[in-house]
Every structure is written in C-alpha cells, then in structure tokens.
Image (spheres, grey):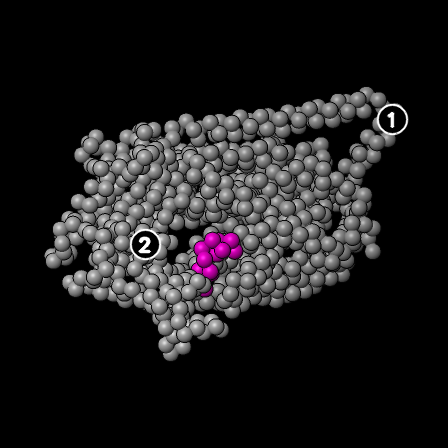
Amino acid sequence: MTASWKQILLILASCRHISTKTASPTPTPLVPEASLPAKKFELKDAIEPETIELHHHVNVTLECTWTGNQNKLPNLPGYWRKDGQERPDSHVTVELKNDQYNIKVVLIINSEESLGNYSCVFGDETEMTFVLTVPQIGEKRDKPIVSYLRDFVVMTCKMDNKHPEPSTWTWFKDNGTEKEQITVDVTPGHYEIINEKDEKTFKTKLKMRDLSDADSGVYYCGAVYPIGISMSRMELKVISFMEPVKPFLYILVEVVVLVAAVLFYERSQSKKSNTEENGSTADQRDTEPQGDAKEAEESNSVRQRKA
Amino acid sequence: MPPTPTDVLGNKPLDGGWGWMVVFGAHISIGFAYSTPKALSIFFKEIQEDLKASYSEIAWLSSIMLAVMYAGGPVSSVLVHRFGSRPVVMMGGLMCGVSMVTASFGSSIVYLYICTGIIGGWGLCFNLNASLTIISKYFLAKRPLANGLAMAGSPVFLCFLAPLNQFLLGQFGWRGSFLILGGMMLNCCVAGALMRPVTPSQKPPSGPQANGIQPNVGNTKKNGKCMRRTKQFVDLSFLKDRGFVIYLVGNVLYIFGAYSPIVFLSAYAVSQGVDEYSAAYLLSIMGFVDMFVRPGTGLLANSKWIRPRIQYLFSFAMVFNGTCHLLCPLMKSYPLLVAYSVFFGFSFGMVFALIFECLMDLMGNQHFPSAVGLVTIIECFPMLLGPPTAGLLVDVFHHYKYLFYMCGGVIIAGGVFLFVLNVYNYHMLEKENLEKTTEPNQNTLENQEQAETELTEPVAEEMINTAKHNPELRSSEETN
C-alpha cells in the first residue's frame, strides 16, 4: 500500500521536473543515459565517509584516488561496493599512474534504491565511502512531544533553504508494521496539514485536534523529492492531565507535613523553655542569683543606652 | 585596649544553633529565587511552539521575572520590616507556587507574562529579600560564612533544576512540568517555616529606641512610629551615606556586565568550533565551581584578617571576574574555554558570596532590609540593559570578542572604583573616629567600654557600626 503511494508520488513529482524521463523507474542500468544531468564527486585518501545529498535524477561519477602505501605494487585489484555488498561487474585492475591509484564508476541515480553507500576498494586494505542520500531534514527530535487528551498538538518539520525545496510534504504514522500515510479528509477536523515557506526554511505542520490515546505513537514527516522521500522521525505521547497532578499532590502533602512539623517542633521547644522558666521562678534559691544577674544585665544595658 | 566582648556576644545574635537551620531555609529560598528564571529557559522551545510566540517574546519571560524580582525590593523590605521574615517568605512561596500552577493552564504568552513573570517574580522577590534579612538577624560573627552558604543555593538549585526540567519536559510536557514546579516552589513555605523570628526572650525587653526598630515585636505603642518609619524606609535617605553610594555605583557597573557572558558563552563556544553539547557543558562547569566557591569565600571572608577589610576582597573579586572576561577572546580551543569557565565560576561565586555581605557590613542590621530593597530596585536597570546591549555589540561587530571586552572592562572599572573609593572611605572613617575619640566627651568612651562588657544584640549592632569607625575595636571583636 505504502510502496505504491510512494511510487505514484515520485512519478508525479518527477513529471514536473524532467519531461524526457521514461514512465517507470528501472534498476540502475550500466549504460548511462545521456539526457540526465551529470555530477562528479571525488575522494582522495579519505578516511571518513563523504555525504552527498541528491534530490533529482542524475548521472553520478564517483572517483577515488589513493596515493598508496610503502608497497607500491604496479597493479591492484579494485572494485566497488554498494551498501556493503560487492557490485558484480565492477572488478577492475588498477594501475599505478603518477604514483597514484585511481578508480571511478558512473552511476545512474534515478530512484531511491539507487541511493546508498558506495565504497571503492583498493586491494584488500583501503576503502573510501560515498554516502548518497536525499537531503536530510535538520532538527531531529530525540525527545517525545507531549500533549494532553482532548487538547491539540502541532508537529513541525523544517528543511532550510540551503537544500532544494521539496516537491511536496507528506506525513506518515507508524502503526506497528508499516508507515501509513495520513490523509487529511479521514476523520474531518482531526488532522490538518499546513505547508509553509519563509525566507529561511520550508516548513510543514501536522496539526491534530481532540487528541486521544490512539494518537500516541511514532510519526514521520516526509519531504518528497523526485529521487525519494526524506524522512524525519518523531514521537508523540498523549497523556491525561491527571498524570502530572499526581506528583503535584504528593509534593503538596509533603510541604504541608513539613511546615506543620517545623511549627509543631517550634511550639514544643518554646513550651519546654516556658516550663523551664516557670520552674526557675518557682525555685527561688537556685535561680535567684541567675535571675538577678539577668535583670542586672538588662538594667545595666538600659542604663548605658540612656546614658 | 578594651576587653573583648566574647562571653557577652555569646548567643546574641545566635551565630549558630537554630541559625544554621535558618541558613538552610535561606539556601532553599535564594536557590529558587535565582535559579528559576534561568531554568525556565529549558521550556522555551516547547512553549514557543505551543503558544505560537517568537523567540524574543519568550525570552522576555525570564527578563520580566528577574526584573520584578529585583524591582519589588522596597515593597518586600517594608513587609519584612512590618511582619518579619517568616510570613513574607511563606507568602512568597505560596505566590510562586500559585503562579506556576496557574501558568500551566495558559493559552497566550501575555497570560504567562502575568502569571509566571509578574506574580512569580513577586513571590521570588519576597523570598530573596526576607531570606537575606533574616540572616543578618541571626548571624554577626559568622555572617560572611552564613551568607556564602545561603547564596550557594543559586548554583546548587540551578544544577539540580536544569536536568530535572529536561526530565519533566519529556515526561509531562511543559504544562505538567509547570504544575510540578509550582508544587516544588511551595517548598519555599517550608523554608519560611524554618525562619523562626528572633524571639523576644533572646532580646532585652526594652530595645534601643534611638534609631533602631525591633521588627518582630508587634507592640501597639510602636504602631504610630512604625508608620512614620515605614515612610522613612522607602525614601532615598541612604543616598546620603557615602559607603552606600560607593557600593551602589560599583554594583551597578558590575551587574551591567555580569550576566551577558553567561548568556552568550555557549554561542561564543559554538562560534569557536565547539559542538553544542560541549558548549552547554561549559555552563555546567561554571555552575559547579560556583557551588563550592561561595561557601569557601564566606569562610575566607570570615577570617580575622579579611573581615575588617571585606570591601577590598569584594573589589578584588570583581577585578578578577572582569579580567577573566577580558582574557576570554584569547581562549580559542575547548580546553582553554574550560579553564575560562572554571575561573569565571570562581570569580562569579566570590562576588556573589560577598555582594550582600558587604552591604550588611556597610549598613548594619537595622538599615539592611530597606537598603537591600533600594539596591535591588536600582540594579534592575543594568540587569535588564546589560544582555541586550551585549547582544547589540555582537550584531554590530559580528564578533563576540567585543562583548567580552565590554563586560570585562565595565566590571574592572566597577572593581577598581570600589577599591579606590573604599581606601578613601576607610581613611575618612578612621579620621572621623579619631575626631570622635579626641573629643573631650569622656562619657562616650566609658559607655563604649561598659557596652562591651554587657552587650545585647541591638547594642552589638551599634558596636559593629562604631567598630567601623574604630579599627582597634573592630580587630578585637574579630579575634573571637
């Protein structure tokens, strides 16, 4: 179901861009088509993979150059890998020219299947990787978006304008087994998709009203390009408003208990000192000197201040 | 040399015992006061999306909260003066709790401004002001240490609230988080409950009527005088006090430059090529160092060599802070930025441990509550103007170094100003002392000697004030 939706979208999208395109996408043929635009990417002695973002159908030439190590053999076996698998018919013998080994391949990138990790391999040791991918949506949300029952939520995806504008945007909900596309007219009012663009970004917003527990789950926004769909994952959690109220009530009880405890302790302390004072005034023999001393102190201080 | 008043100062003010529980309460209270406006920034993105506000509209929330917290100082002073610290802090805690709970139901940004910003800010203001006041009532000899411990609440709570807020946000969303935070802020009421008023049994029944007022004795005879004095406390008569004006000017300069580096540190680090997580980590490092430096500085300031010249330590701390900022643009790699954060945290903690202690030292116990109200309302302006001015510098020059130069320069100017003028002030105080003691009024001297032998708290306060004028007395008092 979803695959066919995707294909229809891709075809519709690609129709707008390239008029000489054939009707249905085919697996990558080895003979390059002359009508597609061409791009070339090179890596020299690269250790890290190089990410290349493509959005429409192109002929891509990938070239790897390696300066070799101490043992500079005149000839090396070289081949290409796609997504870790060896590409058949890509084995060549690489000659040492100008103190360098060089290997290249031309690819037709015209479908999502043709994107992936392409690695050139020299001999048994050296491998350099090109990662061909759709433009990635920035701002990944690791944390779930939390919203409340019967409330609404707006989920946003942005593509900044350094990347090309998507042909269109789509939204998918993960229902456990597959990604199901969200269509706006099902359950009217529940879903609403708003696409916007401003000076810096291209945005899409999925607004859901009157949330229920069934709305919790994983959602994907997709930026549709001729070459494929770029997805970004986000999680929605719908909770009842009672959930935060429970910890709040626990804390409230704790505060009341502590305040009461502190005030009670204070009262019991002051009662103790009161009874001690009462006890001391009753027992004149022991406390008279002290009491006198206290009074003497106080009267002295009063005298001094007045003086 | 007059005899040391050790045995008599004894427990009045307490300088221990229940006083440490009061410090704990003040720690919580001040902790919430300073860390809440900063910790709220974690929710900004969510609130922005939910309420459809722009980034600057959201940022105003913190600013309003801080501004109200500082601007409400005089009102808080009057209330503390009238009712004592305990009811005011409990009221403050209640207001904060209510403000956050009502804010969680908000559907517009203006509603949040009013609930969290204004009502929450008022609550925090009551907390802050009253907590500082009660420390000055419970401590004298160990007051710098008590202040350092209480002010340490700010970094401790920030370290604790920041990850907690992240967790709450992920579990309950921003509304649920506000609800729970409201509940947590009710703990300020517990802090308030701990702030036992200094009971009349610990004070002599007849307090000094000369210029002081006993804020805890609700004596009906004094109500008429209270009203008059309330008016007196809100007025600007402090501006005639030399020490106060020096302190105020130095502080205004400091506050203008103090907060901007914190606001822009992460952005600066990112511009130097540091990744976002490590840049955020810099602020945590600063907070962590701050946490330990504040009580440490309090302990240092309490020592007998430093206490008489605590204003010099304060100016040194300011100059140190400013120098850190001036050197920051030279820190271009991550390890150097970490070193900067450590020194920044160190100097920031030193200044803030002393900032209110120095005011207490200058104004004394009785004038402190209203002095602090006046200081905070005046400091409101540099605090609000500082970060936007810094931001403007960044926008105009497209480089962060000018921000750091400006902040460092202003702070150093404040520190040097304080240092130089305190040299002058101490000199003038000594001169005034000499004039007083060379007067043919022998009674004054005798009274001073007698006063030392049998002191009570308010008189001890007068002693400290006079000690300012008599270095001999001061050093003898400090050997306790």
Q: Main secondary structure of the magenta part?
A: helix
Position of B35 with respect to A286 (left or right) is left
Q: Which residue is mark 1?
A: A286
Q: Which residue is mark 2?
A: A116
Report the amino acid beneath label 2: Gly
Q: Position of residue A60 (x, y in %)?
A: 26, 63
Using the rendered view, name the quadrant where residue B20 is placed.
top right
Q: Secondary structure at mark 1?
A: helix
Magenta region: which residues?
Answer: B269-282
The answer as to whether the residues below labels 2 and 1 share one chain is yes
Q: Name the residue nearer the viewer: B100 or A74.
A: A74
Q: Secondary structure at mark 2?
A: strand
- The span from disc 2 to disc 1 (Cα, nearest Å) is 97 Å
How many residues crowd mark 2 within 10 Å: few (<14), some (14–19), many (20+)? some
Q: Is residue A21 something that shows in the picture?
A: yes
Using the rendered view, name the quadrant where residue B130 is placed.
top right
Position of A103 with respect to B30 (left or right) is left
Q: Quadrant of the N terminus of chain B?
A: bottom right
Q: Name the residue nearer the viewer: A1 or B378.
A: A1
Q: Name the residue nearer the viewer: A42 or B293.
A: A42
Q: Name the residue nearer the viewer: B241 or B64.
A: B64
Report the amino acid beneath label 1: Asp
Q: Position of residue A78 (x, y in %)?
A: 37, 65
Q: Position of residue B458 (x, y in %)?
A: 69, 43
Residue pictured at 74% horizontal, 26% vertical: A273
Task: Tell me the chain of label 1.
Answer: A
